[in-house]
Image (cartoon, rainbow, N blue to C red):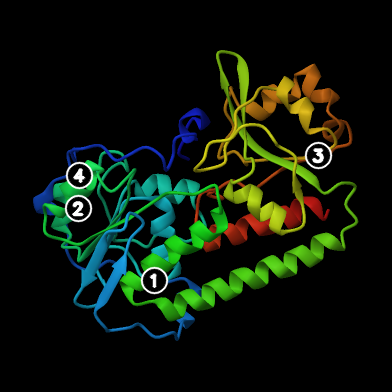
Amino acid sequence: MMKKAPLASLAALGVLALALSGCGTTDVAAQDTAAPESATSAECSADDTATSTDPVTLTDDFGRTVELDKPAERVAVLEWQQIEDALTLCVTPVAVADAEGYSTWDTAEVLPEGVTDVGTRQEPNLEALFATNPDLVIVEASGADDEIIAQLEAYDVPVLATIGADAADPIAKMLATFDLIAQATGREERADVVKDEFDAYLADAKGELADADLATTDFIFFDGWVDGGNVAIRPFGQGSLIGEIGEELGLTNAWTGEVDPAYGLGQTDIEGMVAVGEANLLHTGTVDDTEDDFVSALDSNSVWESLPAVEEERVYSFPAGIWTFGGPRSAQQIIDAYVSALSK
């Protein structure tokens, strides 16, 4: 099993700009440019929504106009949320960045065999990418002047540039990214179905939690890591996707500390958790057991053991493999995890 990536580094996921030059050792000449195996999920096998054949004109997250003679069919995707979104739309990319990492951290949609891996999200191998003959590249960028956009456009292939998150309304931003990809691929009808399912998921789960007679609706979701023997904790505060989903379910996010403006993520230590009072404690699931696992480190700390939720056994782990920065299907996994944990 792939070793879990250090959560310290995960704090920057989605906000790091892709490196300026593609590098790697991929043998471009050996790349298979045939279409990959189609998405084979049960949903996609049964999907009967229409795919548009009309020309596409859309505006991406940086105000750039993207024009296509017809909806994109051979899509290369360089970030995990957007990989997931394409697969949810029943569009299998011809190329992705960090396929192994995606398959470890985002289990909402399975990446089929045959998709070309073009290296890391930060340093994709552009020669390998364009050897797959994409008709659209989807990238996450830091701004309209991000050099990765110009570098990709130098290959005369349209580029759809997206913003990773917006703490002002993370759910709306997640769905807007999904809609952009649906427009680019002619899959708006499928997107409407998925969004309706997401809304129904939220409504049903909110009702289930309302009937659960919770001791408190206050919660804090967090992950963490061990650094030099000390536990660093990252609360998902106001403006985080996972936090806002919790609030949509009728819960109250107890973390009121400072957070970043894109992802709603904070920073604290064990002592800082005293401020959340009686709140239920929810944390990310670990991919594997490691000697420096932050959960084990918490369990041996007297301050942690004195927290009301710890004393009352109201500390819950979400399943591993839920990407907390994902699309609608990851969001549904988050909803399921809330209900499973709190309605016990």
The picture places residue 225, in percent across and down from the top left corner, at 58, 26
Q: Is residue 185 above or below residue 304?
A: below
Q: CA distance from mark 1 to mark 2?
A: 21 Å
**Dot placed on the residue nearer the N-terminal end, 1 or 2:** 2
What kind of element bears circle 3?
Answer: loop
To which quarter of the image does residue 203 belong? bottom right
**Dot placed on the residue nearer the N-terminal end, 2 or 3:** 2
User: Please, what is the three-letter code of the amino acid marked with disc 3?
Assistant: Ala
Q: Are marks 2 and 4 in contact (CB under 8 Å)?
A: yes
To which quarter of the image does residue 266 belong? top right
The picture places residue 99, in percent across and down from the top left corner, at 36, 50
Q: Are marks 3 and 4 in contact (CB under 8 Å)?
A: no
Label 4 packing within 10 angstroms: few (<14), some (14-19), many (20+)? many
The picture places residue 281, in percent across and down from the top left corner, at 75, 39
Q: Which disc, if any, is residue 279?
A: 3
Q: Residue at x 47, y 71 (%)?
A: 41
User: Please, what is the three-letter code of the amino acid marked with disc 4?
Assistant: Asn
Q: Nearer the viewer, mark 2 or mark 3?
A: 3
**Dot placed on the residue nearer the N-terminal end, 3 or 4:** 4
Q: Residue furthest top?
A: 228
Q: Residue at x 75, y 19 (%)?
A: 300
